[in-house]
Image (spheres, grey):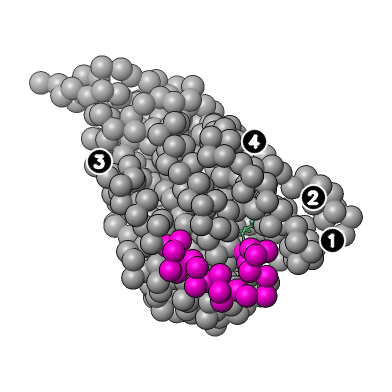
Amino acid sequence: MMEPCDLLIHSAAQVVTCAGPPGPRRGAAMRELGIISDGAVAIRGTTIIAVGPSAELRRRFHPAREINARGRAVCPGLVDCHTHIVYAGDRVAEFEQRCAGATYQEIMAAGGGILRTMRLTRAATTAELVEATLPRLQQMLRLGTTTAEVKTGYGLARDAELRQLAAIGLLAAAQPVELVPTFLPAHAVPPEFAGRADAYIDLVIEEMLPLARDWYRVSSFAARSIPLFADVFCERGAFDVAQSRRVLAAAQALGFSLKAHVDEFAELGGLAMALELGATSVDHLDVTNPVMFPALAVSATVAVLLPLVSLNLGLSHFAAARQMIDAGVAVALSTDANPGSAPSLSLPLTMAIACRYMRMLPAEALLATTVNAAHAIGLGGRVGAIMPGMQADLLVLTEADYRWLMYELGGSPVERVIKRGQVVVG
Ligand code: NIG
Ligand code: FE
């Protein structure tokens, strides 16, 4: 007696399941992909119900619809766990300044950088922000991203930050990429508070965080148990450790999950502070002293590395992914997609650079953009692996071998994208 299912994907040269025990993957387990040759995946509604050899699943299931993967590879939908994609305008002129030798920090100190994007974003309506961001999400989907974290941080004032949150809510309902909201009001010191960063932090704590929490409570994110994160840019020229701690501790008391941008250019001590508060992820870690790796390895915190920033800024230094993985740190990779330090929406390019410049293996890079990236945004039990019970988010690649995702430079070997059981690309 055959069982019904809504969709059966079969005849994949490899089904790269990324299946494993609960929790983020570390050490040698970051190389175990659980590949099934000539594999198939059965889906009912939005959920994966079975994974196994094609012959077995074709005997077992009577599908309403089938997809013959024709010897291509199938892998989990990719998870981009750190993005700043809701903004207006661009930074093309600053890009040319950097080509001519100016540094990212010099441009930031001169009132450009994040503050330039802030001025343009403040002037935009919620509808304009949605309109500017939709094509970015469409491109991400074509590149294989089925879930993305999205930060505010270009409003830097109460109403403008809330407009960014509202835009994230509208975008989540308007297109297939599943979004996870992060509130980042302490991304830069706004001009109204120049030289008075502590006064701005007071405003963030007293007014902005409670309003963001109230927005979330009645949002579709809360209804679907998607967490709300708070984040901070702990960096020279942005916020120091004491200010960052105040923001994150206040957010935690209000029920936010935590993230922190730490050690991008200068190591201020934000990493130890974020670990102490039990942050879900710590992001960047480009200049982290390796003496911190054992503490990171024994924590539940995921290290999110963003190699496109080094690539884009023309730096020869990359985060020490190899050493971190060998020390047992749970490493995730993300684009950091933003108009300044990483104008790219491509996780395949991110993986390609991580393999070449951070000495990650292809298997580690894939786990870092699936299972571990999902854990970095609190969705580890739901997305990032092809296992019964997980959400049916899958890619059919154009090639038989998943390593084409990292091998091809600047391409997109993605043929079809399936999100929550629906074919959304291809
Ligand atoms: O993650 N580091 C801080 N924030 C972003 C850059 C944002 C921007 O330049 O607009 C980052 O690199
Ligand atoms: Fe960032």
Q: Residue 193 occupies which quadrant of the picture?
A: bottom right
User: On the image, numbered disc 4 is attached to which residue?
Assistant: 411
Q: Amino acid at mark 3?
A: Pro
Q: Earlier in the sequence, mark 3 or mark 2?
A: 2
Q: What is the x, y in percent for residue 11?
A: 38, 25
In front: mark 3 or mark 2?
2
Q: Residue 98 occupies which quadrant of the picture?
A: bottom right
Q: What is the x, y in percent for residue 99?
A: 85, 53
In front: mark 1 or mark 4?
1
Q: Earlier in the sequence, mark 2 or mark 1?
A: 2
Prevailing SS of the magenta stretch: helix
Q: Amino acid at mark 1?
A: Ala
Is there CB contact under 8 Å for labels 3 and 1? Answer: no
Q: Which residues are magenta?
A: 188-209
Mark 1 element type = loop
Q: Nearer the viewer, residue 110 or 356?
A: 110
In front: mark 4 or mark 2?
2
Q: Earlier in the sequence, mark 1 or mark 4?
A: 1
User: On the image, numbered disc 1 is attached to which residue?
Assistant: 102
User: On the image, numbered disc 2 is attached to which residue?
Assistant: 95
Left/right of residue 265 with respect to residue 201 in the rendered view: right
Disc 3 from disc 2: Cα separation: 46 Å
Disc 3 from disc 1: Cα separation: 51 Å
